[in-house]
Amino acid sequence: MAKKPLSIWYQLFICLCIGAVVFVAWQQQESVRSWFGVAAQDNGSGNGRGVGAPVIVAPVRQEADFLVFETVGTGVAQQSVLLRAEADGRVIDSSLVADGQFNKGDVLLRLDDSEQQLALRLAETRLVDAERNRNRLEQLRQSDAVSASAHEDTITAVELASLELQRAEEAILDRVVIAPFDGVSGLPTVERGDWVEAGDQLATFDDRRSILVEFDLPETILARLDQKSRLRAASFVAPDRVYEGTIVSIDSRIDPATRAAKVRVSIENTDDLLRPGASFTLALELQGRTLPVVPELALQFTSASLYVWRINDGMAERVDVKLVRRRSGEVLVDGQLSEGDRVVIEGTQRLTPGRAVNVIGNSALEAAPAEGSQVES
């Protein structure tokens, strides 16, 4: 007797049930894998958790979240001025030469001051005459031979003559350019015999015993910076040298447009190889807080979180972590991990919380400390 075929609706119902089971199994695949792993090792023992899952572990290290911030900047002299003429006149003497070394107070350039010298002699003569007239009237004043107003006029004349003398002296000084500090002159723009006017540029003048470099540091890593942060600098003008820099100032505010603060560093230039205006590549070493370091293989991902499996009294324990930074083969994480904790790097697919484990292989695997992460401006 032939069997009655199943109705189309019944077949459809069976297919939907099978599909639902497959879908639930796929959504819970980690639990399903763990269940089958336990069942495979139970082998009829009746206690799957009593059989250790084979795993390979590695120790947790604690290291500072070390960063190297790389940027570029332009150097300036620690003191720098642009020499200008303070008066009109013809250059009669000049010591300005390219790369000339001068001490503070040295005369760098002179303008013709013949008229000012005559004005000075005239002012000196008027002052002597005014003082002589004042002294004579002071003697006559004692015998009431002159009025008090006449005597006061002579005192005023002395004061006016003294001011005129000071103005004549200042006019002569305006025609002399003096080194404002110990430094080096740049290429002069005038020569002996040239006519200059007040405000004309004569030359640059720099104190380059140290070079200052300014750069922007993002606000996201500004908290790491302190006066002891190490900085290395290099420049094309001295390609074979690496210089140590010192942080001299940090701006008191953050630029809202760039979201960065200006930082100024000083680079010693005792060998006088560096030049103001040169470009510099800077590498600023920034220390951060101490964090756990685990092999990248230990990091497990789910749709909602990151975690690692830690071995605690022979049992697997799940520890949620946050990824801070990747290094070569390792990751810095933020989580409840301590120095020396053992985390699983192989065999994670069969683990569940509280599952017994059997550590195999080299459990004392030590990864070499990695170089600090680099951040570029």
Image: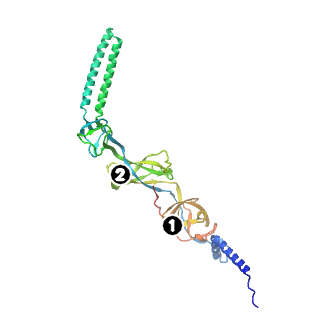
Looking at the rendered structure, the number of numbered marks drawn on it comes to 2
Percent across and percent down for residue 241 are 34, 55
Q: State the SS at label 2.
A: loop
On-image quarter of the C terminus: bottom left
CA distance separating discs 2 and 1: 48 Å
- Tell me: residue 207, above or below residue 237: above
Which amino acid type corresponds to the residue marked 2 in the rendered image?
Ala
- Along the line of sight, which residue is nearer the eye, 258 or 294? 258
- Image disc number at residue 6: none
Residue plotted at (49% across, 45% down): 253
- Image disc number at residue 365: 1
- Tell me: residue 60, above or below residue 89: below
Residue 340 quadrant: bottom right
**Could you classify mark 1 by the number of other residues whose Cα lies within 10 Å: few (under 14), some (14-19), or many (20 or more)?**
some
Q: Which residue is mark 2?
A: 278
Percent across and percent down for residue 353 are 63, 66
Residue plotted at (29% across, 19% down): 130
Which amino acid type corresponds to the residue marked 1 in the rendered image?
Leu
Is 37 left, or right, of 175 in this rendering? right
Residue 199 quadrant: top left
On-image quarter of the N terminus: bottom right
Q: Residue 28, can we see it? A: no
- Tell me: residue 318, above or below residue 277: below
Percent across and percent down for residue 119 are 26, 27
Q: Residue 251, can we see it? A: yes
Q: Earlier in the sequence, mark 2 or mark 1?
A: 2
- Along the line of sight, which residue is nearer the eye, 213 or 145? 145
